[in-house]
Amino acid sequence: MAWWQWLLDISGAVLLLLIAFGVGLILRRRFIARHGGTFELSHRLSSDVAGRGWVLGLGRYSGEKLEWFRIFTLWPRPKAVWYREQLSYGDRRLPEGSELMSLYPDHVVIRCHSLEGDVELAMSESSLTGFQAWLEARPPGTDWNK
């Protein structure tokens, strides 16, 4: 077989892999969203450099926990989980500098406090309203002084 035929075969195989990956991402997102309660949620994994460390993802409310899924992976399990009773809302701000390019256009950055330390999340205004309502809607018998 000539070299250009090998090149065509390899190009076709790479194209098929890319298409399969794209279809996998679509199916995974539909699988995650099948029970509702999902929204676009970015999470800052590293705050070493100002404005960097943001990863796009999806958030999903699942009972007493908020699950965060990376958007560009086929892994079906959440990458991070925060429990409602261990999370409290801190403050909010608009994205600054390079964050404007890293986050979705209409998102605001919020800082939450958890047992592991501060957590920075970015979400839309409407998702923030839902997040605040979810945080405040603790079940009956909850000790509000914690």
Image (spheres, helix red, strand yellow):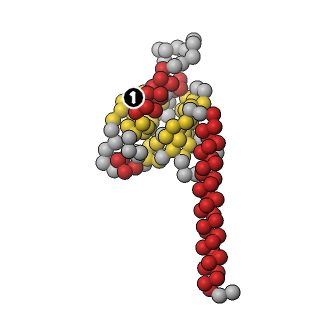
Residue 42 image point, x, y percent: 46, 42
Amino acid of disc 1: Gly
- State whether residue 3 is above or below residue 140: below
Residue 107 image point, x, y percent: 39, 39
The part of the image, by quadrant, that contains residue 77 is top right
* Residue appearing at x 64%, y 59% in the figure: 20
Few, some or many residues within 10 Å of mark 1 (<14, 14–19, 20+): few
Residue 67 image point, x, y percent: 56, 36
Q: Is residue 104 visible?
A: yes
The foreground one among 26 and 77 is: 26
Please name the residue that numbered disc 1 is placed on. Answer: 90
- State whether residue 83 is above or below residue 13: above
Query: Residue 69 vs residue 112: left or right?
Result: right
The foreground one among 139 and 12 is: 12
Asked which secondary structure carries label 1, the reply is strand
Residue 31 image point, x, y percent: 64, 42
* Residue appearing at x 30%, y 48% in the figure: 97
